[in-house]
Image: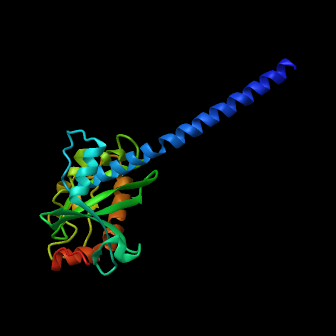
Amino acid sequence: MSDNLKSILFAVGMAVVCSTLLTAAALGLKPYKMRNILADRQKNILKSVGLIDEDKRYSYEEIETMFAANIKSMLAGGDGRIMPESETHGTGFPIWLYIADGLPERYVVPVNTRGLWGPIKGYLALEKDGSTISGFTVYKHSETPGLGGEIEQAWFQKNFRGKKITDAQGDFVSISVAKGRVHENISLTQQPNFVDGISGATLTGKFLTTGFKAILQDYEPVSVRFRTQGARIEK
């Protein structure tokens, strides 16, 4: 057998062994990866409703226990009714309720909108008044670090707390990201519906603004029910 043939056979053998090991590793680690993804999303939902201390580290078990004790995963119908998934046959919009003393205290809607370089995914939580934002989190994005990537930073997300998706008359207007500082660029009457923008990331702010409006419009029937009737879970 020539030296060249030996080299080729060795290379092929190594390739087969390496690919087999990589495939085995990927399959073996998949359950842990999926658990990481689930825990991260649960943590973001808990954070959006104010149940997570940002300065504390939590184990998977702590996140899972806290989520199970406080959050109900439901579906919202087009008429605003909130129902268990089993009652909707898989149709409707996903929604999560923060339950306190047996009653919905806040509700969380998923954010999935276009960004500058890819989708922005997170959660937006609202108070039971159906108007006031209690929190905003991001768990996935492709924005530029130091610019649009600031959407994942605490200083930006905290801007959403206490803001409104309705105007002074109670009509839906959504939440928008300002170009610059709210108090410098937005009229006093509109300031409750805007958050400070990110310097150098105007397009990221525009994409978020457009996405928020579309998403919150879909959930407006739910928000109207909260504003007018309070939270109820259909049985």
Q: Quadrant of residue 161?
A: bottom left
Q: What's the residue at 43%, 44% (across, down)?
A: 33
User: Quick one: which residue is furthest to the top in this view?
Assistant: 3
Q: Quadrant of residue 203?
A: bottom left
Q: Compared with residue 86, is residue 28 higher up or lower down, i.e. above or below?
A: above
Q: Compared with residue 217, is residue 68 higher up or lower down, i.e. above or below?
A: above
Q: Nearer the viewer, residue 10 or 123?
A: 10
User: Quick one: which residue is furthest to the right in this view?
Assistant: 1
49 left or right of 120 in image: left
Q: Nearer the viewer, residue 230 or 216?
A: 230
Q: What's the residue at 25%, 49% (across, down)?
A: 156
Residue 176 at x, y = what percent? 28, 62
20 left or right of 97 in image: right
Q: Nearer the viewer, residue 99 or 127?
A: 99
Q: What's the residue at 73%, 27% (across, down)?
A: 11
Q: Is residue 15 visible?
A: yes
Q: Quadrant of the C terminus?
A: bottom left
Q: Compared with residue 40, is residue 49 higher up or lower down, i.e. above or below?
A: below
Residue 58 at x, y = what percent? 25, 41
User: Quick one: which residue is furthest to the left in this view?
Assistant: 101
